[in-house]
Structure formats: structure tokens, C-alpha cells
Image (spheres, helix red, strand yellow):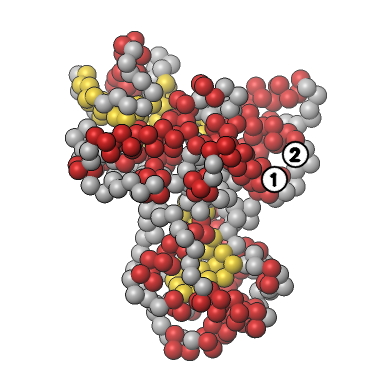
Amino acid sequence: MKEILRDIILEFHREALPELIKRSLGIPALPKDIRKAYVFIGMRRTGKTYLMFQHMADQIAAGLDKTNLLYVNFEDDRLENFQLEDFQTLLDVYFKLYPQLLYSDKLSFYFDEIQNIPGWEKFIRRLLDKEKMSIFITGSSAKLLSKEIATSLRGRSLPQEVFPLGFNEYLMHYGVDISKPKMLTRKEYSVIKHHCANYLLYGGFPEILSLPITLHYQTLQSYIHAAVFRDVIERHNIATPYIVKLFLTHCLQNIAAPLSVTKIHQTLKSRGETLTRNNLYDYLSYFEDAYLICPVPLFDFSTPKRRVNPSKIYCVDHGIIRAYSIRKQMEYSACLENAVYIHLRKQEYENIFYYKTGSGKEVDFIAQRINGSIDCFQVCLSLNDEKTKQREISVLVEASNELKIYQAYIITEDHEEIIEVKNLKITCIPYWKFALSIDNSNQTISRQATRD
């Protein structure tokens, strides 16, 4: 094992890092007296490993020698027989190669798919307690989920969700410079709007960007198939996989709509399937753990009311909607709403809900900050029809009266306007500007500062 580990370490230091799609996901620096492992979690294929590579590249660009970095991928077939005690061998081999780094406080160790090694958390806790290096971990959502991290590392981790590319990252991939929004020309705006239309249709999984359009939906379906099999069916040893797949397909074909588990259960029972509603609730929990779906509950101060009302369902990437749609011409609005949800989830919000007014009208998103304050968001493709426009305004006015808010947003495909009704200011903004945090005057929206 010593020779194998020596080869792996030297290969990493001699070989160039892979080409990267630049991500703008920040990795917060911690004070020296606080020791936590950075853990990247998310659905498969979202770019967790490449985010670690980007962090390595940034450190090297800042002048750090690559030998100060250690990277081990535990899915390397040479490490098939790696055991818990071999972690110490790994340290011994590394510091024998680079003895001058033994007491360095500028080391970063990266462990990919570490969950393959039973007892790995004991080693990580020892490093956190006894050593000085920064520690970065990724793992498949099959064995390294956010709930398990909290248990395994007992508060010694800093989980970071990794989603597919945000719109600004998508633009960076195509060489579109949005660093100076006030300097954009009309032609550049047109280019951005063109990319936005494609982004909403095909999504932001990194690999998709390098594939022909004809392969996009097929590839996205393969991601879902792999995740549902490995992270749900195989992981939880489910005896009726076809029910799980059927249920997930139903969810993905009804994005941005409330999900009634009772109705689905009744439908399956009428077909002769033997399962309980609790089975379906379990499956929903498994889907959420694997980042296959993202439930959004009803906003209500009454806990019982929140529990009896169905959650609305979203997914980790809006490209998945079209990949599973049986009515593609009608799904663009769902793609837009899903993209808004994911963008909000990346912001400084503690919770995201949907809301029903006293008269039964629905607000798409109520986003709650840590201090309890809320922002109100409605999503509508077009406000060109006056009846549609007045309907959307009336929903927000009613919600503002009930929730005592004075500012709301309508995210559209391409409509810009400021509407003031009594004490309520409604900002209508195209999604592409919202996702880039550009307001109608090309200024940064401070309350919507993005971390895409």
C-alpha cells in the first residue's frame, strides 16, 4: 500500500489539473482557531470534484506550491483494499516525500469519495483535532448526505451545497463578460438574452455544455436513472423499484405543482399495488436526500396547517423538467419558476415557502431570512395581457396586506416595470437580470446579492 500511495501522490503533483468550468461558489475562510472540514454535497454530476480542483487551482495561482496539496480519489481501483489503518500510512508517505512540510500550516488535503472507506470519519476527526491542514471532502449522495455528515463529524463539518451552474457561471463558460453591467451594449444584452433562453431550456449541468443539443435530454435522464438507482433503490434496498421510478417520474412531470401523496396512493392502490402512504412519504424523503426533488412547503404560522397542505415540488436543475416532459410546449413557465427557486435557494435565505392568501390566491415564493423578515416573489412569463398583469398584482397586494410587507417582485421572461400600489412597491424584472442581480438601472440589487 505504501508504494501505491506514493505513486498516487506523485502522479497528482506531476500532472496538470483538468480544464475547469469556472464556478463562482465561494468557500468561506475560517479563523485559525476554528477547525472544520469543508464538505461538498449535492446531486451527482453537479461538479463537486471539480469545485475542489478549482480551489486547488486558485491556491496555486496565489503562489502556493502544489506539493502543499494532497488529493486522493478513493474510487481509484488501486485503493480497493484501502482500510482505516491505511490513512496513517497515507500521512506517513506524504510527509516522507515532503518532510519540510511536516509543521506547515499551509496544507490542504482533498479527499474524494472518502465514504468508500469504513470509519473514515474517525480519521477526519483526528486530523481536525491534531493537525493543521485544511480538509476538503466530497462524496456521492448515496453514502455522504448532509444528515449523515452532521452525525459522523458531530459538528466538525461545514457542508456546502453544490448545484448545477448558475446563469452567471453559464455565461462565463461562453465567454460573456458581465463584470461591468453598466457598460453592457444593446448587442451584449441580446447575446445574454439568447443564452438565457437556452439556459432555461437545457439547464446548467456542467457536462451538458460540451454536448450536442440532441444529447442533452438523454444525458439528463441518465443522471436521474443513476441517482435513483444508486442513491435510493440500492441504498435503501427497495423491493419494488418500478414503483419508485414511477413515483419519481410523476414528480418530475409535475414540477412547480402541489404534490398530493394521498391521490397518488389511491391511484396506485386502484392498480393493485400494495404499499402505504408512509412508503410514498419515505420515497419523497429519499428523493430529497439525493437532491432529486426539492419540496417547498406552505407558509403559515400554524404548524398543523403547514403539515396538512401539500408541498410544491421543484428539482435541482430546470433542464430536467424538459427531459421528462410530455408537453414540452407548456413547460417553459415551469422551467422559469424552477430556475427562480434554485436561485433563491442559493441566497441568504433560511427558508423558502409558497403562500396562499385568505381568498385562496397563490404566491409562488415567500423567502424568509434568518432574522425572520420575508421577501415575496411571483413568477410570470409575460405581463403583456392586462388581465394577467392585474391578477398578479392583486395576489401580491393581498399577500402584502396579510403579511405586512412593502416590497415584492415579479420575475418575468422579459418585462421590466416598477409598480406602486398603495404602500407596496412591485419590481417587475426579467429572469436574466434577476439571476445576475441587475436592476432596471443596471445597478446591483443589494437585497438580492447573488452567490451563484
Quick check: 169 left or right of 211? Answer: left
Q: Farthest residue toward the top?
A: 387
Q: Quadrant of the N terminus?
A: bottom right
Answer whether residue 75 is visible to the viewer in this image. yes
**Secondary element at image label 2:** helix
Does the CB distance between marks 1 and 2 fall below 8 Å? Answer: yes
In the image, 335: left or right of 266?
left
Residue appearing at x 37%, y 76% in the figure: 64
Distance Cα–Cα, label 1 vs label 2 = 8 Å
Q: Secondary structure at mark 1?
A: helix
Return the residue at label 2.
241
Position in image of residue 124 (x %, y %)? 54, 70
The residue beneath circle 1 is 229
Q: In the rendered image of this protein, does residue 138 appear above or below residue 241?
A: below
Observer-nearest residue: 124 or 443?
A: 443
Residue type at numbered disc 1: Phe
User: Measured from the top left, where is residue 65 in percent x and y?
Assistant: 40, 78
